Image (cartoon, helix red, strand yellow):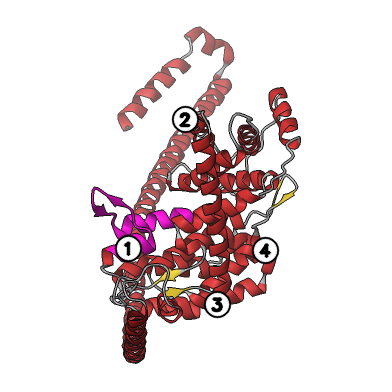
Amino acid sequence: MCLRENEDSGQEFGALDVQPYLMDEVGLVEAALFELFDQHQLELKVEIRRQISALEMELMRKYQKDASAFARIDKYSEARRDTDWKLDTLYQRNIAEALDDHLTSIQRDHEIKSQMEERRIRIDLEEAKRKEKAVQEERLRQERAREEAHAKRRAEEARIAALEAEKKEKEEAGKIEDSRTVISPVQTNATAGDIVRASASALSLEQARLQKLRELENQNQSLMSMSNMNLDKHTPPIGRLIRQIRGIEENVRTKASELLKIFKNPECPESITVAAFAKKVVEHCENPDNAAFASAQVIVLISSQVPYAMDLILADFHKACIYTVPKHIAYSKAAFSSKEAYYKEQLGFKEDGGQLESVKDYLRRMEAYMRLYGALVQTETVRGIENSHGPAAGWLWLARFLNALPANAFTAVALNAFLQPAGFVLYRKYKSQFRKLLHMVSSHFLNALKTRDDPDLRLIIMEIESYIQDRRYLQEPEGRRMEGKPLLSSQIASEQDYNGYNYYYSR
């Protein structure tokens, strides 16, 4: 650096050299001034260089100081981050441990409560089983007592009957009936009272309807035997129309109108076609595609124009399903030659190839009949026409059922199939009175079913309990409300034919 300064100084002094001829002109004073000026400038430059060098050194020191400070700051930040991470990890670990302890405590409390609840439930179940067993034993004892009393009474009745038979044998030789023959539906009053379970009024109505049906069938047989024409050819269209009934308002009206046209056919007596309609509409309920509510409306429309059709339909109901009466016939070894005869002749089991249908198939058929019957009695009016066998008849059926019929698989299926379609209207019409009957079903009928302890009854018990507890009688049954469609001109003509059908029937 000193060398560079000397070189610069030499250059500067070289620049200040003056020509000899100038020295002569300017003089010594001016030369001295120039020399002093140059010296002063040189000193200034030296001072400036020194200060610049000092500043550079100061800046270098400050830079190093700042770099050291930044390095310390970075090191501090790194250390701080490490510390924060360790603290955060420790905090999260503490939280996790506290949460785990809390959850463990809650789980332990829940386990303790669950164990206590299970113990309480187990105790309650054991207590309920003990009570149920005691009730069942008491019921069995009472049933045995009743059976013994009935056996004694039947033995006494048999003894009396034997004495009477012996007396008649002496009086009317050759006209004796063995008192030990199989009991048919016509029995002595005392024995029938033990076997046939039904109210007297229901049995009276059943006999009256069946009598009307028998008389009409005899009349139709006479008409068919005296006629030279084949009258049976007029009945197939009736079955076809019944199979075409759907849950559509216009379909119901048109099918009823077409059926009434068949009844008006002068080529065939009305009693034959009406009897065929009554039988086929009842039988059709066994088909899976049967629209029960729509069929019930067709029945109401037909019976409004042909009043005796309702009695025929109810009679066919009673023949197909004794629970539409309502009625139940109990099995008795003394009354029937065999259980097969009892099932076939009294309950209406079907026979195919010498083999009776299964109980499951029988119950399925009875359920179909009761569903259609329930749909019929819940129908109040159709197109302004009042049903002659409506909710009042349904109320009587339910009251007679609960008063007279025992609790078993047959009657349980019948009751459930009746309540499903009919309960909605019966509750809407009778309110609290209907709820009282449902309470009787729960407290008496279902309890009697439960005491049987039959696994096959559990499903039907659950269905009836669910219907009552879930209050499904507040909900309108599916299919009850007919779908509406606009009238076509051809259908308007059918409506006029329907309204113009005036019925008059005398016997």
In this rendering, the label closer to the viewer, 1 or 3 = 1
Please give the label number shown on residue 42.
Answer: 2
Q: Nearer the viewer, residue 402 or 324?
A: 324
The answer to whether mark 2 and mark 4 are in CB contact below 8 A is: no
Tell me how far mark 1 sits from mark 2, CA to CA. 145 Å
Q: Earlier in the sequence, mark 1 or mark 4?
A: 1
- Report which residue position mark 3 lands on: 439
- N-term mark: 1 or 2: 2
Q: Earlier in the sequence, mark 3 or mark 4?
A: 4
Q: Amino acid at mark 3?
A: His
Between marks 2 and 4, how big is the CA–CA gap?
Answer: 126 Å
Quadrant of the rendered image containing residue 503: top right
User: Pointer 3: residues within 10 angstroms few (<14), some, or many (20+)?
Assistant: some
Mark 1 or 2: the one toward you: 1
Query: Alpha-carbon distance for marks 1 and 3?
Result: 31 Å
Q: CA distance from mark 3 to mark 4?
A: 16 Å
Q: Is residue 186 found left or right of 342 in the rendered image?
A: right
At horizontal 46% and vertical 74% (from top left) the residue drawn is 197
Per the image, label 2 sits on a secondary structure element best described as helix
Identify the mark at residue 343; answer none if there is no mark. Answer: 1
**Three-letter code, disc 2:** Leu
Give the residue number, with chain letter if any, for mark 4: 428
Disc 4, SS: helix
Give the distance between the C-alpha atoms of the residues marked 1 and 4, in whole angstroms: 37 Å
Magenta segment includes 141? no
Pointer 3 with pointer 4, Cβ within 8 A: no
Give the foreground label among 2 and 3.
Answer: 3
Q: Quadrant of residue 72?
A: bottom left
Magenta highlight range: 341-369
Quadrant hosting residue 63? top left
The structure residue drawn at horizontal position 53% and vertical position 32%, both measured from the top left corner, is 227
Q: Quadrant of the N terminus?
A: top left
